[in-house]
Structures are given as structure tokens and as C-alpha cells.
Image (cartoon, helix red, strand yellow):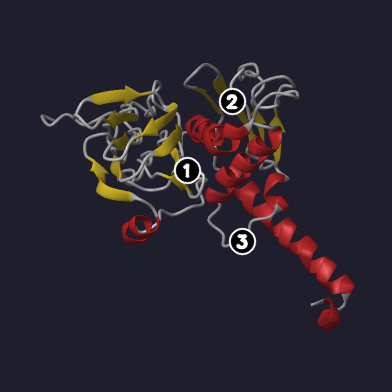
Amino acid sequence: MIAAWGGEAVARYMGFVQKNAEQSVQRAVGRLKNGKASVPMDGGGEIAVEVTVDAAAGTAVLDFTASGDALASNFNAPSAIVDAAALYVFRTLVDDDIPLNAGCLAPLDIRVRDGSLLAPRPPAAVVAGNVETSQHVVDALYAALGVMANSQGSMNNFTFGDERRQYYETLCGGAGATAGRDGASAIHTHMTNSRLTDPEILERRFPVRMEHFGVRAGSGGVGLHRGGDGARRRIRFLAPLEAALLSTRRTHAPQGIAGGGPAVAGRQRLIRLDGSIEELPGCFSVSVAAGEAIEIETPGGGGFGAPVSPDV
């Protein structure tokens, strides 16, 4: 492009793209209202945000300073993740067809507190911040804006393998309902950025059998618009392997908004050779023998609006 049009023209258009994105977000912000929300986290911690909108100026303050202190676990999130989550949320509120770029953040004043779980000091562990805590930040923002109930809130990071082979997948769940429609079921919500391997390929390359994968009926929250249902996935291992899960929303279920009901929290279990079942926590690492299975039920999404009585 520089060879064809010159560096000055390219730089000018780069500035235009960013300014256009800024103006698009300003128009979206102008339709919003003030609000606040808090989202509790499994294992302690809380994401709290207060949104203050200046509709005339098309700007908003996103104040996360009331969020909890840094955690001893790895569920802390660097402040860059908060910026990325806010960028995602406000980009989804823009009706215009614009490329994702830093101009979207210009109308937003994002505030975090140093030493909190959203701005931890070294050497705080942060590995789950990108895949799990980010989902809670998004849910808190959507709830504060009154736009969308909590989605499943977890990527359900499931891994297994041995010294020679390793596999990593993220599992779909329920999407939160909105004022206009029910949440989708068994779908990757928000920033998962991944798709599942086809069962035929999975079984060809790894010593496992996919015994069940389907919708977890009834796991979405009730409401004027229902939350989407989660998923149920059971994998049987045909060789001894190590398996692990990094997930959340096992203790604190995804919440509804505007009178909508909560979804059903996730759960997981190890099915032993003798058929006995061992319930597992949301974060586990376990050795599985040949013939044993792990079943994971992912959370649903929260409902939006109070349910309408059938007598009305």
C-alpha cells in the first residue's frame, strides 16, 4: 500500500479507521445508561464494575476498583485482559461494520486498582486470567449495562495426555439471554476463539472414545427469555493417561438479570472401572486407567427478565 499510495496517505487512512471506530463506539455509548454489577468467582474473589455514562459526549467510565484483592490462585488477570474484555464488549454493541482497532477504546476510561485481582503485582499467578477471569469481566460489563445475562463464564479447559501425546480442548456451554432473545445452547461464548476437534479425528489420533456429546437440557436459567443450555461430554480412555480440567462456575452459577433466573452450575465426574462415580472439583488433575471415563457438564446461561406466568 505504501508503494502504491505513499506513506502519508496510508498513515492518514490508518488515523481515519481509528477515528471512525471511536465515533461508532461513541454512538453506541450514547444509547447506554449507568449501571453496576458484581460477579463472584469460584475459589474466592469478585469482579465488580460501575459504569458511568456521559451520553452527550459518548464516553463512559468503567470502574473496576471495587474488585477483590489479588488471589493466591492463578485466577488473577493483568489489566491488559480487562482492556481486551472491554474492547470486545463495546465492539459487540456497535451496529456499524468496522474493523476491530484501538480507536474503539478511545471513548472508554477503564479504571483498575493496583494490587487487585485485575491488576496484580508480581509474582501473582495469572494463567487462568486469560481463559477464565476474562469471561467474568465480560459478564460483569454486560450485566452492568443491562444488555445480557451471564453466559457460562468458563472455557472449560480440558487436557489429557502422556509423555508422547497431549491434547487440549475448550468446551461449549450456554449463552446468556438478552432483552430480545433466548441464549444459544451448547456454544462457545465470548472469547474462546476455538473449535472442538471432530470426534473421528480425536479417536484416530488419541486412545479415547467419545461416548456422549450433547445438549445438557434444562441447564439454562428461566426468564422472559431463557438462558442457553450447557453441554454434556463424556470421553472414555483406552489407555492410561493424565487428565486435567481448568474451569469455573462450578460453585457460583451464571446469574440472570432483570428478574431472570440463574443457570445450573457445571460439574464433572470420574467413572471408574467398577462403575462407581467420583465427583471432581472444577480444577483437577487425575490419573485415569484404561477403561475409565470422565464426564463434564458445562454451565448454562442466565435468563433475562422475569418469567411470564402461564395464567397471565
Amino acid identity at mark 1: Asp
Mark 1 and mark 3 lie on one chain; the one further toward the N terminus is 3
The answer to which quarter of the image holds residue 262 is top left
Could you say which disc has been placed on residue 49 in the image?
2
Mark 1 and mark 2 lie on one chain; the one further toward the N terminus is 2
The answer to which quarter of the image holds residue 198 is bottom left
| Nearest-to-viewer mark from 1 and 3 | 1
- Which residue ends up furthest to the bottom in the rendered image? 4
Q: Residues within 10 Å of mark 2 (few under 14, many from 20)?
A: many
Foreground pick, 118 / 168: 168
Residue on which the image places disc 3: 98
Provide residue 146's location: percent of width, then percent of height: 46, 33
Foreground pick, 208 / 101: 208
Horizontal side of residue 99 vs 296, given as left or right: right
Mark 3 and mark 2 lie on one chain; the one further toward the N terminus is 2
Q: Is 89 situated above or below 245?
A: below
Image quarter where the C terminus lies is: top left
Separation (CA) of disc 1 from disc 3:
44 Å
Provide residue 191's location: percent of width, then percent of height: 52, 46
Q: In percent of the image, x 42 and y 36: which residue is there?
A: 243
Amino acid identity at mark 3: Ile
Q: Is 89 situated above or below 19?
A: above
Q: Residues within 10 Å of mark 1 (few under 14, many from 20)?
A: few
Horizontal side of residue 86 vs 283, given as left or right: right
Residue on which the image places disc 1: 162
Q: Residues within 10 Å of mark 3 (few under 14, many from 20)?
A: some
Amino acid identity at mark 2: Val
Provide residue 289's location: percent of width, then percent of height: 33, 36
